[in-house]
Image (tube, grey):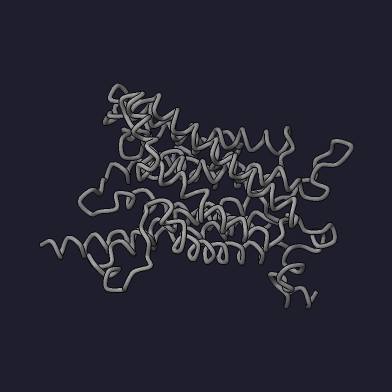
Amino acid sequence: MEALKQGADALFILLGGIMVLAMHAGFAFLELGTVRRKNQVNALVKILVDFSVSTVVYFLVGYAVAYGTSFFVGAEVLAARNGYELVKFFFLLTFAAAIPAINSGGIAERARFWPQLIATAVIVGFVYPFFEGMMWNQNFGVQAWIKALTGEEFHDFAGSVVVHAVGGWIALPAVILLGARSNRYRKDGAISAHPPSSIPFLALGAWILTVGWFGFNVMSAQTLDKISGLVAVNSLMAMVGGTLAALIAGKNDPGFVHNGPLAGLVAVCAGSDLMHPLGALVVGAAAGTVFVVMFTLTQNRWKIDDVLGVWPLHGLCGTLGGIAAGIFGTKALGGLGGISFTAQLIGTSIGVAWAVFGGVLVYGILKATMGLRLSQEEEYDGADLSIHKISASPEREANW
């Protein structure tokens, strides 16, 4: 029976890893559909290569930083317990690799290729796993300190803060340091619109992410005996809440509608194992509204050229989710309890502060030493031709 349980757990978390791996195709198509046609190839290449770099760095360094587990042992040791530790690494790697995938959308269309890969290596090797280990592996006594102070530990079941808020807040300094795309904001105050190149591809990316998210959230239980249908239904309710809120707040804009479910899912991750489904619906709706309002503000009022809106979507909605878990997870609002609003506020604040510090440090050093941005001519030609020497549809263009 023990051998059967070990095999079932390994299969369970492996399937979760595969579902979250598929989400990276969602990241790719979401970016491909949002950027202009001359940057579509670059969007696809970045996501795949970022994932590959993340895998090597997280295997060699990042997983050890977070969990103290080294893979520099014999294969017979690695294969113990049906290789559960290896498939757990695979599952958690897909979370870690989401950080550069998030960043990719914010800095799209004008970032140099190799400096971004270096940033990926540093972020996945140290910046992200440092905070991951702090909150998910009791590193440095931070969780013990929060519990002594508030009575409960900081709770983040599936990564509203650990993954999404950290990713979004790392991206914000990168976007600001990189600067807006050429002619996006003109000296006379006019704003040049860069509409999505393909709503169907954008929608495809959103759907792939949405489906994979049920692996992201439900499989965060990590063992079969801890699986919870509550997590699945809460994820569903937050997804539809985010969609409907974005539909209304975004006035039927298809870009907002397809980012709405993602906003809801980002926000529900932290408390998806605690909330009542109606609470999850409210949290999802709040996140969908926050995304639309803050995306509009950043783009049009504050003139921060965050191409896919990754700071509002992941940074702000992830922050909202971390705090909302301390509200809607309480028994007073139909949740399971065992959570503290103050603990959620402290843990979320630590995550935001660490992410901003890491983003400023990594991208600031790269900007000062290597430079982050394509030349004006390269940006005008597009990242596809400038970096990869081919466009998304060369035969079609040749016929024109």
The quarter of the image holding the N terminus is: bottom left
Between 189 and 364, the one nearer to me in the picture: 364
Residue 349 x/y as whole percent:
50, 31
| Vertical comparison of 236 with 7: above or below | above
Which residue is situated farthest in the left direction here? Answer: 1
* Residue positioned 55% across, 66% down in the render: 48
Judge from the rendering whether residue 161 lies leftward or rightward of residue 185; answer left or right.
left
Judge from the rendering whether residue 91 lies leftward or rightward of residue 386; answer left or right.
left
* Residue positioned 54% across, 56% down in the render: 27
Count of numbered circles on the image: 0
Between 69 and 178, the one nearer to me in the picture: 69
| Vertical comparison of 145 with 110: above or below | above
Q: Residue 159 appears in which quarter of the rendering? A: top left
Residue 229 x/y as whole percent:
26, 45
Judge from the rendering whether residue 147 lies leftward or rightward of residue 101; answer left or right.
left
Residue 372 x/y as whole percent:
73, 54
| Vertical comparison of 360 with 91: above or below | above
Q: Residue 294 appears in which quarter of the rendering? A: top right
Judge from the rendering whether residue 17 lies leftward or rightward of residue 115; answer left or right.
left
Between 385 and 287, the one nearer to me in the picture: 385
* Residue positioned 43% across, 46% down in the render: 132
The quarter of the image holding the C terminus is: bottom right
| Vertical comparison of 309 with 59: above or below | above
Q: Residue 380 appears in which quarter of the rendering? A: bottom right
Residue 232 x/y as whole percent:
32, 46
Which residue is situated farthest in the top direction here? Answer: 332
* Residue positioned 61% across, 36% down in the render: 251
